[in-house]
């Protein structure tokens, strides 16, 4: 009664035979048939006790493990027992304890599912009775409803261990870390802004004592740039990419393009289907992105599909353990794949974190918030006068080709972004394109304040002097850096990235000189309420004219004109820039491809091309 469990580590002769520490509790009813293990040489019940031989000699097929400590002796014992393939292994989640509630939670929700099927004592009793009555084996019968995700996690972790040597301690550490974050996430739920995030460890792979990814910080905030394209987003992306700690690659738009076609991959709870999705998305990012991702040495970034598959499975399993009140459906597998692809790129570029410039990701805010949590998810909401946005679309071979379609999409994207701002204001920093033009340094400084202190990796590197670029230098580097030059030669839509201050001054309110009154009226008729909400002064609607109301027939005609315009744009692009046209053709082909292993197909095609060249 007076014993402090936290002094356990300081006690000597714990569980020594012949002392009170080794006595059975009064509640334990001993039988003559009981086997008492002695001479144990460590925390593992198999060491020195002959337990493995006993199990084999008595042809025991099911083993239930409980005791003290949950995160020490029980963990080590089920770890060893998991190597016995013929054994159905169960850990008693409420039949063991630890020095603290959090340590017990770490063990029972983190490591127990990896090596065993966790069950309560009541469930264990039912299983034993079922076996005694000649019922089905536990692994195929009663326990299916108890541990669907647990068995999957165990199977995957053991497969990894068997294929790459003894990595049990790696996965023990990772699971302990993950489970501790789960516990903290639940315990601190009363103060959401202070909650710790499970996503800080979802991509933690301590494969080596000194991992190569030292600069990357899985606990750092990640950033989503949202709003609308043609708002200066690529310019802002290249400026932010000059930060020493931020990777800002050109986006392949994974969530936007794959959520609508996700059903063709079938039930993603079936691993083969999920494996195909991983390969599909990785091939999409590697082969179909308009701007190829390069590592810090200028080499193409390649994605480890097995690693991404492991992360997707374990992430969704952990999310389901933590968010039992939410429907963690199979769309979360795609978010996990997307997240790990961006993580791998940040690691390859030796950056601490990353920003994604898929401007419509705000429509997925609820899922992203569940995945990353308030402590990691951040938004840069970039706004530009929709009249200038519309004009830019019409002059550039990208997107829609009719003002009605352009402005309708712009308005919808602002609704999504403003929703995020209304429900999660502290996670959003709003930036006006016009402010970037007028006072770039002040606007970038405010943005950097929101994004957090810039640094090299997680700590300053030894033997180096960390000299951070001034904002003015970042702005200059953004137009002359590798990223801007790489993009500008690939497509007309990126050509402005390498232009200087004189060009940018011309971008302010270009619509006043280049747009006719009828087009201004159409745009403001659709977007006047959103423009007013965002603080943009109306030129025509409510000033000289009332807003137009378009009939269904007119809207259908606008749609046909838009489709015809897109067709003509692509035909012109094939003539003026065949390389850009081909990249878009590949992108479209990948998205339209059946749910098959694309990397196998593309590798074969590359082999044929190489033979032809020879």
Image (cartoon, rainbow, N blue to C red):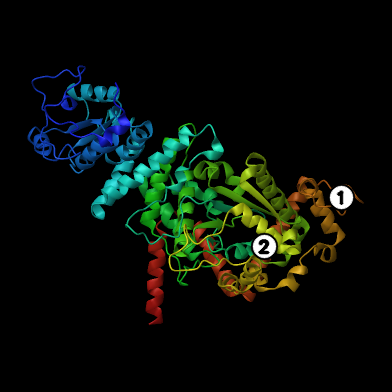
Closer-to-camera residue (215/113): 215
Instruction: Give whichever of discs 2 and 1 has the lower sequence position.
Output: 1
Cα–Cα gap, marks 2 and 1 = 28 Å
Quadrant for residue 175, please give it: top left
Give the residue displayed 25% in from the left and 54% down from the top. Answer: 163
Closer-to-camera residue (39/85): 39
Mark 2 and 1 residues: CB-CB less than 8 Å, in contact?
no
Q: In the rendered structure, find residue 541 and report the number of the disc placed on it.
A: 1
Which element is circle 1 on?
A: loop
Q: In the rendered structure, find residue 98 and report the number of the disc placed on it.
A: none
Give the residue displayed 74% in from the left and 64% down from the top. Answer: 437
Describe residue 284's horizontal placement relative to residue 23 as left or right.
right
Furthest residue in direction right, as rendered: 544
Within 10 Å of disc 1 (Cα), the crowding (few <14, some 14-19, many 20+) is: many
Which image quarter holds the N terminus?
top left
Q: In the rendered structure, find residue 566 and report the number of the disc placed on it.
A: 2
Quadrant for residue 164, please give it: bottom left
Which image quarter holds the C terminus?
bottom left
Horizontal and vertical percent position of residue 405: 72, 54
Horizontal and vertical percent position of residue 150: 33, 38
């Amino acid at each position: 009664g007076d014993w402090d469990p936290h002094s356990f580590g300081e006690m000597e002769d714990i569980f020594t035979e012949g002392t009170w520490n080794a006595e059975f509790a009064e509640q334990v009813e001993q039988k003559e048939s009981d086997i008492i293990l002695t001479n144990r040489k460590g925390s593992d019940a198999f060491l020195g006790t002959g337990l493995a031989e006993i199990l084999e000699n008595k042809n025991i097929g099911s083993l239930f493990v409980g005791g003290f400590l949950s995160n020490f002796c029980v963990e080590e014992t089920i770890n060893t027992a998991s190597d016995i393939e013929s054994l159905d292994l169960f850990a008693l989640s409420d039949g063991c304890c630890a020095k603290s509630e959090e340590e017990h939670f770490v063990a029972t929700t983190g490591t127990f599912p990896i090596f065993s099927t966790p069950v309560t004592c009541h469930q264990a009793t039912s299983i034993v009775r079922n076996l005694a009555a000649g019922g089905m084996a536990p692994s195929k019968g009663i326990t299916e409803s108890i541990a669907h995700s647990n068995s999957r996690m165990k199977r995957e972790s053991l497969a990894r261990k068997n294929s790459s040597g003894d990595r049990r301690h790696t996965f023990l550490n990772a699971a302990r870390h993950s489970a501790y974050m789960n516990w903290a996430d639940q315990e601190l739920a009363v103060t959401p802004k202070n909650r710790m995030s499970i996503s800080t460890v979802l991509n933690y792979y301590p494969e080596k004592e000194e991992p190569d990814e030292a600069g990357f910080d899985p606990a750092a905030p990640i950033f989503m740039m949202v709003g609308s394209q043609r708002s200066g987003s690529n310019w802002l992306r290249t400026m932010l990419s000059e930060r020493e700690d931020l990777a800002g690659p050109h986006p392949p738009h994974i969530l936007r393009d794959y959520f609508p076609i996700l059903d063709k991959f079938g039930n993603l709870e079936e691993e083969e289907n999920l494996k195909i999705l991983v390969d599909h998305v990785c091939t999409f990012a590697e082969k179909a992105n308009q701007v190829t991702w390069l590592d810090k040495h200028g080499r193409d970034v390649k994605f480890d599909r097995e690693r991404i598959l492991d992360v997707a499975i374990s992430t969704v399993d952990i999310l389901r353990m933590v968010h039992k009140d939410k429907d963690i459906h199979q769309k979360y597998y795609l978010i996990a794949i997307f997240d790990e692809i961006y993580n791998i790129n940040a690691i390859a570029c030796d950056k601490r974190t990353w920003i994604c410039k898929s401007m419509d990701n705000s429509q997925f805010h609820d899922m992203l918030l569940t995945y990353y949590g308030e402590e990691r998810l951040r938004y840069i909401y970039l706004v530009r006068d929709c009249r200038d946005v519309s004009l830019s679309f019409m002059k550039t071979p990208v997107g829609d080709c009719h003002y009605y379609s352009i402005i309708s999409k712009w308005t919808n994207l602002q609704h999504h972004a403003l929703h995020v701002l209304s429900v999660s204001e502290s996670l959003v920093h709003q930036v006006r394109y016009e402010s970037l033009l007028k006072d770039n340094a002040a606007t970038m400084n405010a943005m950097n304040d929101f994004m957090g202190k810039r640094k090299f990796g997680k700590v300053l590197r030894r033997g180096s002097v960390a000299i951070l670029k001034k904002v003015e230098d970042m702005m200059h580097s953004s137009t002359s850096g590798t990223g801007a030059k790489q993009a500008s030669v690939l497509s007309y839509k990126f050509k402005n990235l390498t232009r200087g201050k004189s060009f940018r001054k011309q971008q302010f309110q270009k619509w006043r000189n280049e747009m006719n009154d009828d087009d201004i009226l159409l745009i403001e008729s659709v977007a006047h309420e959103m423009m007013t909400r965002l603080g943009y002064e109306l030129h025509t609607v409510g000033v000289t004219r009332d807003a137009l109301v378009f009939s269904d027939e007119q809207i259908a005609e606008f749609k046909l004109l838009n489709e015809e315009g897109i067709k003509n744009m692509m035909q012109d692009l094939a003539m003026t820039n065949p390389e850009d046209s081909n990249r878009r053709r590949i992108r479209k082909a990948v998205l339209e491809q059946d749910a098959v292993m694309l990397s196998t197909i593309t590798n074969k095609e590359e082999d044929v091309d190489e033979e032809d060249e020879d």
